[in-house]
Image: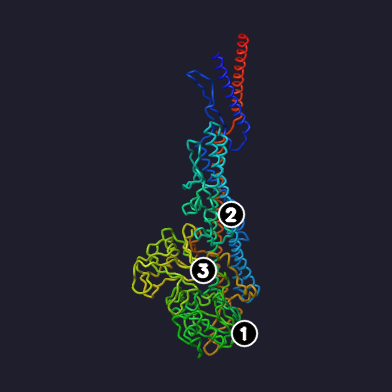
């Protein structure tokens, strides 16, 4: 009886084992087209009790998966998604930028601007040509603004998409963590966990599309997931990933300046920030687009817009419309007009001329006479000789005196609410103009005067600007309305190190009250400092170990200095290099200059750091802000086609005049737009000496090249990924022929086990009958 019972139990185990096997086959067949499903098989083993066979049992449930191939697929999926997520952005750029030959491209528009200047040079007195120049100038700046808007819209879109990716990553890591727990719990009791493992693999596959990951499995079935840079995403308790999407985006919005939030894995610490650590997946592609590709294109646009503004304005400021200006407002904003001074360099001088309604001179005076306080038998301002440096406010007062004393009694020359020089004759019978010359004699050769500018009022010239009118920005064709509240260095390599310097920072809230100037801060820059170290000293203060910085008396090494108030410095990537950016937190105009020590004693530091950095008012934002001056749009006749001319045959010793047919400035505008100009390194483009339209073509070509490279990378990466996926599917996928063959085997085995049970049942029945 014992052998019969043992046989029954063995047959029963065979029945149950083959029933489980049939269930696995049915699951495989049912999921033949299910994405991510891996073929399941069971491992059977014989049961041995007391040295004798006791049937069969299920040893394990396994999946047919090539783990090494799966790892490769996930890495390639990350690379594919890295480039494919950028495709739509490049398509949008191509639609906006176009090709150089398109009628709507910026290069074509600049060519038409040049042609308009050429036509104006031929017919400077015709309103049609004047209007056409203004129209083409407007078209150019509107195109630049449109391109800039598109770039910033795409950056905002990328940042919002990054937020969506982060949200999905949080959901995926939570799901993977829960599946880990389920697999451990069910696996510890011998239950089948292969379907749970498939679900987990699908989640990990999707996570690999979003960010570059690495992973390993523990003996209990748990999987640990982390980024390639080592930040843990899934372990015992998955950390929360945080990123706050920006509400708006501008060309000054950067991660370095804190205007764009980081992507923090766990605590909001710099070491946990994925922003600079992501190497693959959609996240890396979006970060590259938001923080590299698009800002670089913006930098190129700003370089083009700034050069167009500066070079055209330099030429236009040389001119005077017929029969002269009635009113002008400068574009330069003076942070400290009562302290900042200007002076003439060498023998340069400027003729300041009043003219009648026919453009003929009524009176003229030299700028050197205004600076000295007397001229034409008249006294201006306080009458002191300020040839060595006159404050901006005193300069305005003396110009006003000159105009009021010579036929325009209601004239005003003031600094407006934005601290810009504003001139208004308030007399329609008169006009005024300026002519820069090489000497102090009337009728000297024309040449841009060199204006020496003491930006912080410490008695030292900090900057030299070409052109008197250009210095103030009085007769600009292009304006931008930007405060001088951001300074940028040139694009510098990561190996840049500084010379020693003491830098001083001032704005309108730090006036000289009589006991010496106040400062937002003064910073000691030691020799050998990197860009980041310079930024850190500005932001955090430091200790002077050189003895260059001291409030009063002799140098004392070790003196500490605080952070600069209301100023933030950051290091901004630009192309293959970096810029040092210094911005006012409140948006005010401010100055940065080399300085002696605060007590006025001579500094031992150098005075070349700012020039080595190439530090100047930032061009960032210009392409989005530049426009044609409103009064010129309203009255194109205000376009300055010619300059003040000197006729030696008029009057006793010659006189200045304007004429409607004068075309000297129009010719210079045409030449400026046709000839080569120097463009600095910007956004990955090298320094170039080309025309404006050629530089615009370089920007378009750069964008097109990036888009083409992206297309080729997508094609190549997709082919590789699909090849690996096909190979993996051929291993892990369900083969119906194999499953049907297994179905027959397990069906026959099940039937055989059932037949054995039936036979044994008959034997038992007969035995019971015999006993009965």
Answer yes or no: do the residues labelled 2 and 3 have beta carbons within 8 Å?
no
Residue under pointer 1? 427
- Foreground pick, 349 / 296: 296
Answer yes or no: do the residues labelled 1 and 2 have beta carbons within 8 Å?
no
Q: Secondary structure at mark 3?
A: loop
Quadrant containing the C terminus in the rendered view: top right
Q: Could you give the CA–CA distance between mark 3 and mark 1, rounded to whole angstroms? A: 36 Å
Please state the total of marks drawn on the protein image. Answer: 3
Q: Position of residue 421 (x, y in %)?
A: 54, 78
- Foreground pick, 268 / 2: 2
Label 1 vs label 2, nearer the camera: 2
Q: Could you give the CA–CA distance between mark 1 and mark 2, rounded to whole angstroms? A: 56 Å
Quadrant containing the N terminus in the rendered view: top right
Q: Position of residue 56 (x, y in %)?
A: 54, 22
Q: Position of residue 96 (x, y in %)?
A: 61, 58
User: Which image quadrant for residue 649?
Assistant: bottom right
Residue under pointer 2? 160
Q: Is residue 365 above or below residue 205?
A: below
Please report whichever mark, 2 or 3, sits nearer to the chain's N-terminal start: 2
Q: Residue at x 49, y 71 (%)?
A: 590
Q: Residue at x 59, y 63 (%)?
A: 144
Q: Position of residue 652 (x, y in %)?
A: 53, 90
Crowding near pointer 1: few (<14 within 10 Å), some, many (20+)? some
Q: Is residue 479 above or below residue 74?
A: below
Residue under pointer 3? 485
Crowding near pointer 3: few (<14 within 10 Å), some, many (20+)? many
Name the mark on residue 693.
none
Q: Secondary structure at mark 1?
A: loop
Q: Residue at x 35, y 68 (%)?
A: 547
Crowding near pointer 2: few (<14 within 10 Å), some, many (20+)? some
Q: Secondary structure at mark 2?
A: helix
């Amino acid at each position: 009886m014992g052998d019969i019972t043992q046989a029954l139990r063995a047959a029963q185990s065979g029945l149950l084992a083959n029933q489980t096997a049939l269930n696995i086959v049915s699951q495989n067949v049912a999921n033949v087209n299910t994405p991510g499903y891996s073929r399941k098989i069971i491992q059977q083993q014989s049961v041995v009790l007391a040295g004798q066979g006791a049937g069969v049992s299920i040893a394990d449930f396994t999946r047919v998966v090539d783990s090494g191939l799966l790892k490769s697929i996930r890495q390639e999926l990350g690379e594919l998604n890295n480039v494919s997520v950028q495709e739509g952005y490049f398509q949008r750029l191509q639609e906006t930028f176009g090709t150089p030959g398109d009628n709507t491209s910026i290069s074509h528009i600049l060519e038409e601007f040049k042609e308009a200047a050429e036509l104006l040079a031929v017919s400077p007195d015709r309103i049609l040509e004047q209007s056409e120049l203004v129209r083409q100038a407007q078209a150019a700046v509107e195109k630049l603004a449109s391109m800039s808007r598109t770039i910033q819209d795409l950056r905002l879109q990328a940042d919002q998409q990054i937020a969506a990716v982060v949200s999905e990553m949080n959901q995926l890591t939570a799901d993977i963590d829960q599946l880990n727990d389920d697999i451990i719990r069910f696996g510890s009791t011998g239950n089948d966990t292969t379907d749970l493992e498939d679900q987990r693999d699908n989640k990990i596959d999707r996570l690999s599309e979003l960010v570059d990951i690495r992973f390993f499995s523990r003996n209990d079935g748990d999987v640990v997931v982390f980024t390639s840079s080592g930040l843990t995403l899934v372990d015992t308790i998955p950390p929360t990933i945080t990123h706050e999407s920006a509400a708006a985006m501008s060309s000054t919005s950067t991660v370095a300046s804190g205007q764009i939030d980081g992507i923090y894995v766990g605590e909001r610490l710099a070491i946990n920030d994925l922003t600079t650590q992501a190497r693959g997946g959609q996240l890396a592609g979006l970060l590259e687009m938001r923080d590299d590709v698009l800002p670089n294109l913006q930098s190129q646009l700003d370089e083009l817009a700034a050069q167009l503004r500066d070079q055209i304005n330099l030429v236009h400021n040389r001119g005077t419309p017929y029969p002269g200006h009635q009113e002008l407002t400068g574009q330069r904003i003076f942070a400290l007009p009562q302290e900042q001074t200007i002076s003439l360099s060498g023998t340069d001088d400027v003729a300041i001329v009043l003219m009648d309604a026919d453009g003929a001179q009524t009176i003229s005076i030299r700028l050197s006479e205004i600076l000295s306080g007397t001229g034409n038998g008249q006294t201006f301002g306080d009458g002191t000789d300020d040839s060595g440096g006159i404050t901006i406010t005193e300069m305005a007062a003396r110009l006003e005196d000159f105009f009021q004393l010579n036929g325009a009694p209601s004239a005003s020359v003031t600094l407006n609410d934005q601290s810009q020089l504003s001139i208004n004759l308030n007399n329609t019978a008169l006009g005024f103009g300026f002519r820069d010359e090489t000497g102090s004699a009337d009728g000297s050769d024309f040449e841009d005067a060199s204006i020496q500018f003491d930006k912080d009022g410490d008695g030292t010239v900090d900057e030299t600007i070409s052109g008197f009118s250009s210095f103030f920005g009085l007769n600009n064709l292009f304006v931008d309305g930007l405060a001088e509240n951001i300074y940028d260095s040139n694009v510098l390599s990561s190996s840049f190190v500084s010379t020693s310097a003491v830098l001083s920072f001032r704005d309108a809230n730090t006036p000289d009250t009589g006991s010496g100037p106040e400062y937002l801060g003064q910073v000691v820059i030691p020799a050998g400092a990197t860009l980041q170290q310079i930024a850190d000293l500005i932001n955090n203060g430091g200790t002077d170990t050189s003895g260059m910085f001291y409030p009063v008396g002799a140098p004392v090494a070790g003196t500490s200095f605080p952070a600069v108030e209301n100023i933030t410095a950051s290091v901004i990537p630009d192309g293959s290099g970096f810029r040092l950016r210094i911005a006012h937190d409140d948006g005010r105009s401010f100055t940065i200059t080399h300085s002696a020590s605060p007590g006025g004693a001579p500094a031992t530091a150098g005075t070349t750091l700012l020039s080595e950095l190439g530090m100047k008012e930032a061009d960032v934002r210009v392409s989005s802000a530049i426009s044609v001056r409103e009064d010129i749009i309203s009255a194109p006749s205000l376009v300055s086609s010619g300059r003040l001319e000197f006729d030696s045959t008029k009057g006793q010793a010659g006189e200045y005049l304007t004429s409607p047919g004068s075309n000297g400035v129009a010719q210079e505008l045409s030449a400026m737009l046709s000839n080569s100009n120097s463009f600095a390194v910007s956004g990955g483009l090298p320094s170039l000496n080309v025309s404006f339209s050629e530089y615009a073509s370089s920007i378009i070509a750069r964008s097109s090249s990036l888009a083409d490279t992206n297309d080729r990378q997508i094609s190549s990466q997709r082919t590789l990924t699909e090849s690996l996926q096909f190979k993996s599917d051929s291993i892990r996928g369900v083969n119906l022929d194999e499953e049907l063959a297994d179905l027959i085997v397990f069906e026959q085995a099940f039937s055989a086990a059932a037949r054995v049970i039936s036979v044994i049942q008959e034997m038992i029945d007969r035995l019971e009958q015999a006993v009965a």
